[in-house]
Image (spheres, grey):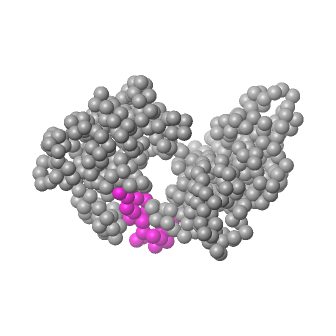
Amino acid sequence: MSAADGDTGLLEGLIQQNLLNEELLGQLGDHAERLPDLEQLRQLLRMELLAEDARLPLLSERYGLPLLAESTASLSPFPEAGRCREVYAQTGIVLMGDEQARIGVLTVQADWLAMNRLELELEPGSPIQWQLTSHARLSWLVAAMAHPQRSQDASALEAAAPKLQSLLEEAVHHRSSDIHLESVPEGVQVRFRVDGILQPGPLLPKSLQPSLFSHIKLLAGMDIAIRRRPQDGHAAYHSRSGREFDLRVSSMPGINGEKLVLRLLDQMPVQHRLEALGFLKQDMEALEQASQAAHGLILMVGPTGSGKTTTLYAILNALNSSERHIFTIENPVEYQVSGITQVSVNPEQGLSFAEALRASLRQDPDVILVGEIRDEETAEVAVKAALTGHLVLSTLHSGDAVTAVQRLLNLGIARDLLADTLTLIVSQRLVRKLCPHKEENPDCPRCQGTGYAGRIPVYELLRVNRLVRDRIRAGYTGRELVEPHKDLHFQTMEQTAQRLVQEQLTNWREVRPLLLAT
């Protein structure tokens, strides 16, 4: 598909219709003039300089693509459901219809170069009727494609799509990790978790709850008829800015109706760096030194949501090169990184952490990340892997660094083996980071006036040196491992908190509850 020669440029047309101005266009940079119209549009969307609905009619006219009809209730999924899901995952295009009337639906963010290829791959004589739509409409089609069990009231479910789209876009804009949708007597109460704190959102009308919840369930592959017991599901979400998210959905029955929690996992290539996470210089050096070892076991401990996986991936990013084979085993894979083999465990199919770890050892790895050590079998295989020449990184649910040692002993690891493999233990929690612009601008958009933007780790760090190894072998437990010897290089959580407050990265209001709890 291409525009006719001599036509007014797409962006020029938007300017003529007062949908775009030269000032906004200038924010793209000088290099943007050399980009095709379509790529310029995508950049404007990513920078949130142009509303999606504003450009659709002009885009439709320029490229000869009709807009998708208002009602899609009569459309049926393409017969080959598996093929449709594959096409959508690879191109952002949804195939609908049947052998006589094939319809291909796309947005501006889709891979338009794939249109000709898809027409050639399908049976000749049945051309695809290409149509253009918005992200909100496309999300409904994805649900219809994946779940032919759609409710009889298709129009009501489709009407819920724009509201879900709005909630998801607001969550992305404010860096929310989760969206809470709770049925209350007055309607549906929305809350967003930002930097670990739940913040109130809008109260949606009670009349919207059935269609909105059913729409979300369909997208996530859940049964819309089940409301009295918990369910889990997931779906892909493509934001208007071009970012891709894995949407994890959990439902729970309550006295006022169901509650849904939507977790957004960013699927863009991860760029975490240790220096950007907030670790103090000397402690960052300890992490880097331990990760450069040819073998050993590095542990991150702490509760769920304490940033353990993020820190481990920052270490992996530093190690990632063509000279190393890096393997990750997770449930689920939270961050996608090129150059790393990533495996998602599936206990229902017999692929546990322990089984995947055993199999990975036959793949000639140099570095292995195990998402979590949660049972005796996984602990045993992880320690043996570290002992036989592999660098193993993992997480463990434990209160602090020293009790992590006891936790592994309780999982059946022999003291000698543990002493020979452990190299570093970090116990981590997250607190909110002070916004550097709040004092200059009380209405700072970055922190939304809260004074906090982002989170920073408060941690204790135990380097397992020769003295600690000897104490493990000798049967020391708990704080006996680290007290009172000064040569242990043990950085306590209180010491870290004091230094972060002194450097004005956070404040005592944030760290005090954490220190009291630990």
User: Is residue 20 among what the camera can see?
Assistant: no
Q: Is residue 443 magenta?
A: yes
Question: Which of the 4 image quarters holds residue 285?
Answer: top left
Image coordinates for residue 104, horizontal then vertical, percent: 77, 40
Q: Residue at x 41, y 30 (%)?
A: 358
Q: Is residue 124 above or below residue 33?
A: above
Question: Which of the 4 image quarters holds residue 70?
Answer: bottom right
- Which stretch is magenta? 429-455
> Quick one: quadrant of the N terminus?
top right
- Is 48 on the left or on the right of 274, as rendered? right
- Please count the marks in the image: 0
- Is 375 on the left or on the right of 494, as rendered? right
Q: Residue at x 19, y 54 (%)?
A: 479
Q: Residue at x 42, y 42 (%)?
A: 371
Q: In terms of depth relative to the viewer, which is nearer, 359 or 299?
A: 359
> Quick one: quadrant of the C terminus?
bottom left
Q: In terms of depth relative to the viewer, which is nearer, 291 or 214?
A: 214
Image coordinates for residue 446, horizontal then vertical, percent: 48, 63
- Tell me which secondary structure the magenta stretch mostly adopts: loop
- Is 62 on the left or on the right of 89, as rendered? right
- Is 177 on the left or on the right of 425, as rendered? right
Image coordinates for residue 50, horizontal then vertical, percent: 66, 56
Image coordinates for residue 352, horizontal then vertical, percent: 47, 37
